Amino acid sequence: MSSTLLSDPFGRDINYLRLSVTDRCNLRCTYCMAEDMTFLPKQQILSLEELRDMATAFVNLGVRKIRLTGGEPLIRRDILKLVDALASLSGLDELTMTTNGVMLPSMAQPLKDAGMSRVNISIDSLKPERFKQLTRVGNLSEVVAGIHAAAAVGFDRVKLNAVILAGFNDDEVLDLARFAVDQGMDISFIEEMPLGEISSHQRVNTQVTSQHIREQLEAEFSLVDSTETTGGPSRYVQVANSASKIGFISPMSNNFCESCNRVRLTAEGRLLLCLGNEHSADLREIIRGYPGDIARLQAAILKAIESKPERHYFDPEQVDIVRFMNMTGG
Ligand code: SAM
Ligand code: SF4
């Protein structure tokens, strides 16, 4: 029996929400953002109370896992208050976050204390110069310090995320995997998606398939297929004789939409039903029109789920989706 009331027309149960808390970021990754980004005015972003009410409505409907994301979630000033409020929602099994790690040296312990279960940290290169180039402004040593801080405070699990781009960092697949395995962490390799118009490169030239990444890894590691899945376009393998798992997130080369269990809420309160489609519902209008009316929000969410698309059709040669990943909430 399903424990969620959120079931879409294709029989998929939705129990996972990715909640974006800001579109802003302290980095400018080339594949994620244009160099000159215009961010949303503050009043368009959901307030702390609005975010809490949104999360409450989803959890009441059966969502069991929430991942906070952005933009960079740790630059939101009241993030710890939000984590504290969401961690105490009855019915929520897991509260996680995806972060670029820059602020983790000071934030890892307060996050853990506020009730965060796990964190994913993005790191696309272990070479300082290249890291700076990929993030435009980033300092690799800050992220590495953030990874160590996360390990030290004892989150359930620390997972690393790396987007692999041909000609930029596809020669670092083994180094990144070794880095994760040496620390007993998991790592996921992500295929770049054509979200938003960028100027740094032509996405069609930088595609690397998960299969290609796996072949590189198999030259050094023995990979054992795992049945673990988080729903959606990711598959995991266990690295033999280690504590680490490697994930392959393959939105481009593989279509695992039939097992999709998630929806996303943008920082301005737009419910995105699929990463690769524009279908969305404006929940901010409801929460601002009827503050605190959780039942009305729930009704709107139930209605929106009826139009969750069956699957995405990404094409790296075309920017079908005009929103950037920092708007979408990765
Ligand atoms: N700022 C945080 C971070 O970087 O981890 C959270 C938000 S970020 C949008 C979430 C994830 O999306 C990151 O792992 C990032 O590398 C990934 N991402 C961003 N743009 C992407 C794209 N066009 N295709 C695939 N992954 C992307
Ligand atoms: Fe910022 Fe994350 Fe996008 Fe990089 S991937 S620019 S860290 S939101």
Image (spheres, helix red, strand yellow):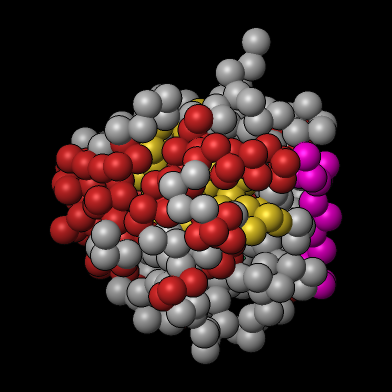
Asked whether 318 or 53 is in front, the reply is 53
Q: Outermost residue toward the bottom?
A: 36
Q: Is residue 232 left or right of residue 40?
A: right
Residue 330 appearing in the image: no
Q: Is residue 8 above or below residue 253?
A: above
- Classified by dominant secondary structure, the portion drawn in magenta counts as loop
* Position of residue 4 measured from the top left corner of the image (x, y, whole percent): 60, 24
Asked whether 247 or 211 is in front, the reply is 247
Q: Is residue 280 left or right of residue 82?
A: right
Q: Residue at x 39, y 47 (%)?
A: 52
- Give the image quarter of residue 230: top right
Q: Is residue 152 magenta?
A: no
* Position of residue 178 measured from the top left corner of the image (x, y, whole percent): 40, 46
Asked whether 109 or 223 is in front, the reply is 109
* Position of residue 204 measured from the top left corner of the image (x, y, whole percent): 76, 71
Q: Is residue 244 above or below residue 18?
A: above
* Position of residue 135 measured from the top left corner of the image (x, y, whole percent): 44, 75
Asked whether 105 or 323 is in front, the reply is 323
Q: Is residue 197 left or right of residue 326?
A: right
Q: Which residues are magenta?
A: 306-318
Please identify the quadrant where the C terminus is shown: bottom right
Q: Residue at x 75, y 33 (%)?
A: 8
Q: Is residue 235 above or below residue 82?
A: above
Q: Is residue 99 left or right of residue 61?
A: left
Residue 77 appearing in the image: yes
Please identify the quadrant where the N terminus is shown: top right
Q: Residue at x 46, y 67 (%)?
A: 45
- Give the image quarter of residue 219: top right
**Total residue callouts:** 0
Q: Residue at x 36, y 32 (%)?
A: 89
